[in-house]
Image (tube, rainbow, N blue to C red):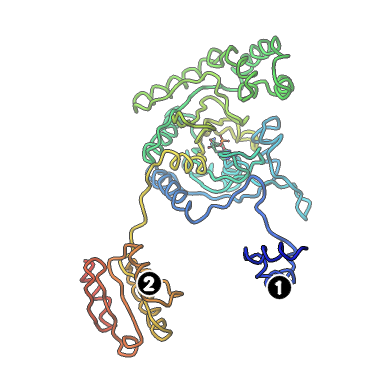
C-alpha cells in the first residue's frame, strides 16, 4: 500500500485500535444467537402496556364472576386437529407440531378454547354447578406469515362459559368485550352474525356451494379446494377476488332454522337492551370450525390503520364438547389479542396510568456508606415506601441527578461520616433543604414527612 494512503487511514483514527482488533479476533465467536422469525421479545418499556391491558381484563373478568384457569402451552396434536377442524388455516398451515422423545405427537397451543374444554372434561367440571365461567391469558402459537400485528407467538386473554345454551350468555360475553374496550378507551366496532346449528347449516351449505360452483374459476386455488372440503371457510378468505364473489353470496342468516333464528334475535335484543352498538355482518364465519350460532369479532374503528386486524373474536361452540365425549354441553367464549390491543393503544396515543414516582431515593458515597445504605433501603422497602437506589454509582452528583429525573420527593444521603455516626441526611428535593437525623429514626421521620 503506498505510504500516503496508509497515513491517511491513521489520521482518520482507523489504524489505532489494531491491538484490540487482534485481541478480539483471538476470541472466536462460534454462535451468535438470533430471534426466530415471526416471534419477538417484549422489552421492559412495553411491559407496562401489556400488564395494563391484562390487569384491566382481569379486573373486569373478576367483576363478571369469572375464575382464572391455566392450561399448559403444550397439548396433544389431535385436540386441535379435531377441535378446530382439519381444513382450517390453523390446522392445515399454522400449527407448531412435533413428535417428542416419547413418540407423542404434540403441538404448541394455537388457541385456548380446545384446551379449556379438555380440562373441563378431564376434571369432571360438568359435576359442578353450571355454567362454569373461566378466564385465561398466555402465549399462543401460530406459524403465520410474519407481519406487524400477526405474530407466531402472541398473547391472548380469553373467557369461556361452559354449560349454558341461553342467548343471554352470548350477550354477556359481547358485553364484556364492549366494556373492556370502553375501559381501555379504544373505539371499536362489534360485528355479529349467526351461522346456525349443524342442521340449518346443511341447507345453507348446499345453496352456497351451488352459488360458488358457478364462480369456481374466479376463486383462488385454496378456495377451489375448500369448495370440496369446507365451503364455509371460503367466506373467511381475504383474497380480493374471492372477496368480490363472497359479497354476492347467499347469506347464512336467511337459512337459519326457527330455534337458531329465535336464539339470534334474543341475543340482539339483549345487546339493544344494554345499548351496545353492533353491526350485522352476514358473511362473518370466523376461522375455526367449532362455532355454532352466534359469532362475533371486535374491530378497531381507526381509519388510518394500514393493517386492519380484529382485536378479538368469539362465539358459541355448542358441539365441541360432544366431539370429545358423550356429553351434549353447550358453550360460548371470546379471546382478545393482547399484542394488537397494545399496538392500538400506542398508535392512538392512548395514555396508560404511569407508575407512581418514587418517594425516596437513597444515595451513598463510599463502600462503607453503601453497606449501610443497602440496609436502610431494605428497611424502607419492607415498610412499603416507594424507594429506589442506584448502588452501582459512586458520584453523589450523578445520584442526585438521577433522583431528580425520577422525581423522588426526598433523597437520603449517607457519606462516610454519616455511616460511622449512624446518621443520615434527609434532602427535600423540591426546596433543596437538608437535615441530618439518626438512622434509627428514619422510618418515623419519613412517615411524618410523606403523610
Ligand atoms: P381467534 O379469532 O383465532 O379466536 O383469535 C382471537 C384473537 O387473537 C384475534 O382476534 C386476534 O386479536 C388475536 N390473534 C390471533 N392470531 C394472532 C396472531 N398471529 N398474532 C397476533 N394476534 C393474533 C380464538 O382463538 C378463539 N379461541 C376465541 C374463542 C374463545 N372462541 C370461543 N372462545
Residue 318 lies, with reference to residue 360, above or below; the image says above
Query: Which of the two labelled residues, at mark 1 and mark 2, occupies the earlier sequence position?
Result: 1
Question: Is 410 positioned to the left or the right of 162 in the image?
Answer: left
Q: Residue 385 versus residue 19: which sits nearer the camera? A: 19
Question: Is 114 positioned to the left or the right of 363 in the image?
Answer: right
Contact (Cβ within 8 Å) of mark 1 with mark 2: no
Q: Name the residue rendered at 37%, 56% in the picture.
A: 355
Q: Name the residue rendered at 52%, 54% in the picture.
A: 43
Q: Could you tell me residue 376's position as x and y percent?
A: 35, 78
- Can you see residue 314? no
Q: Could you tell me residue 92's position as x and y percent?
A: 71, 34
Q: CA distance from mark 1 to mark 2?
A: 35 Å
Q: Mark 1, mark 2: which one is toward the viewer?
A: 1
Q: Could you tell me which quadrant the C terminus lies in? A: bottom left
Q: Residue 368 versus residue 117: which sits nearer the camera? A: 368
Q: Determine crowd level at label 1: few under 14, some 14-19, many 20+ residues with C-alpha closer than 10 A.
A: few
Mark seen at residue 415: none
Q: Which residue is mark 1?
A: 23
Residue extending farthest to the bottom is 420
Q: Could you tell me residue 393's position as x and y percent?
A: 44, 74
Q: Determine crowd level at label 2: few under 14, some 14-19, many 20+ residues with C-alpha closer than 10 A.
A: many
Q: Name the residue rendered at 57%, 52% in the picture.
A: 41
Looking at the rendered structure, the secondary structure element under dot 2 is helix
- Can you see residue 180? yes
Q: Which residue is mark 2?
A: 399
Picture quarter containing residue 9? Answer: bottom right
Looking at the rendered structure, the secondary structure element under dot 1 is helix
Amino acid at each position: 500500500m503506498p505510504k500516503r494512503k496508509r497515513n491517511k487511514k491513521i489520521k482518520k483514527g482507523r489504524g489505532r485500535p489494531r491491538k484490540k482488533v487482534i485481541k478480539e479476533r483471538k476470541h472466536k465467536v462460534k454462535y451468535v444467537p438470533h430471534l426466530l422469525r415471526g416471534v419477538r421479545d417484549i422489552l421492559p418499556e412495553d411491559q407496562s402496556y401489556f400488564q395494563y391491558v391484562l390487569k384491566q381484563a382481569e379486573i373486569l373478568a373478576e367483576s363478571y364472576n369469572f375464575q382464572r384457569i391455566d392450561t399448559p402451552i403444550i397439548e396433544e396434536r389431535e385436540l386441535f386437529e379435531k377441535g378446530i377442524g382439519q381444513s382450517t388455516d390453523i390446522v392445515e398451515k399454522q400449527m407448531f407440531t412435533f413428535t417428542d422423545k416419547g413418540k407423542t405427537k404434540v403441538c404448541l397451543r394455537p388457541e385456548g378454547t380446545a384446551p379449556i374444554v379438555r380440562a373441563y372434561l378431564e376434571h369432571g367440571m360438568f359435576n359442578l354447578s353450571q355454567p362454569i365461567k373461566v378466564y385465561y391469558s398466555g402465549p399462543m402459537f401460530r406459524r403465520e406469515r410474519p407481519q406487524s400485528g400477526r405474530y407466531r407467538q402472541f398473547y391472548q386473554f380469553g373467557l369461556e362459559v361452559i354449560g349454558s345454551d341461553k342467548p343471554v350468555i352470548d350477550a354477556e360475553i359481547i358485553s364484556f368485550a364492549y366494556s373492556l374496550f370502553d375501559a381501555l378507551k379504544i373505539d371499536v366496532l362489534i360485528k355479529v352474525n349467526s351461522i346456525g346449528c349443524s342442521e340449518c347449516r346443511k341447507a345453507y351449505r348446499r345453496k352456497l356451494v351451488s352459488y360458488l360452483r358457478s364462480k369456481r374459476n374466479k376463486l383462488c386455488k385454496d378456495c377451489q379446494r375448500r369448495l370440496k372440503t369446507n365451503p364455509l371457510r371460503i367466506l373467511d378468505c381475504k383474497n380480493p377476488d374471492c372477496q368480490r364473489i363472497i359479497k354476492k353470496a347467499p347469506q347464512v342468516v336467511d337459512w337459519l332454522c326457527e330455534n337458531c333464528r329465535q336464539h339470534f334475535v334474543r341475543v340482539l335484543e339483549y345487546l339493544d337492551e344494554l345499548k351496545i352498538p353492533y353491526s350485522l355482518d352476514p358473511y362473518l364465519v370466523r376461522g375455526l370450525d367449532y362455532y355454532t350460532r352466534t359469532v362475533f369479532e371486535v374491530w378497531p374503528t381507526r381509519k388510518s390503520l394500514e393493517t386492519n386486524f380484529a382485536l378479538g373474536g368469539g362465539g358459541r361452540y355448542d358441539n365441541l364438547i360432544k366431539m370429545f365425549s358423550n356429553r351434549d354441553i353447550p358453550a360460548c367464549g371470546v379471546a382478545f389479542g393482547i399484542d394488537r390491543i397494545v399496538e392500538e393503544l400506542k398508535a392512538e396515543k392512548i395514555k396508560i396510568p404511569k407508575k407512581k414516582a418514587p418517594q425516596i431515593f437513597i444515595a451513598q458515597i463510599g463502600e462503607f456508606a453503601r453497606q449501610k445504605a443497602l440496609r436502610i433501603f431494605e428497611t424502607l422497602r419492607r415498610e412499603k415506601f416507594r424507594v429506589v437506589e442506584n448502588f452501582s454509582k459512586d458520584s453523589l452528583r450523578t445520584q442526585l441527578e438521577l433522583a431528580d429525573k425520577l422525581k423522588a420527593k426526598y433523597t437520603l444521603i449517607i457519606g462516610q461520616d454519616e455511616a460511622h455516626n449512624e446518621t443520615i441526611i434527609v434532602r427535600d428535593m423540591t426546596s433543596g433543604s437538608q437535615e441530618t437525623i439518626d438512622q434509627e429514626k428514619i422510618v418515623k421521620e419519613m412517615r411524618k414527612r410523606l403523610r
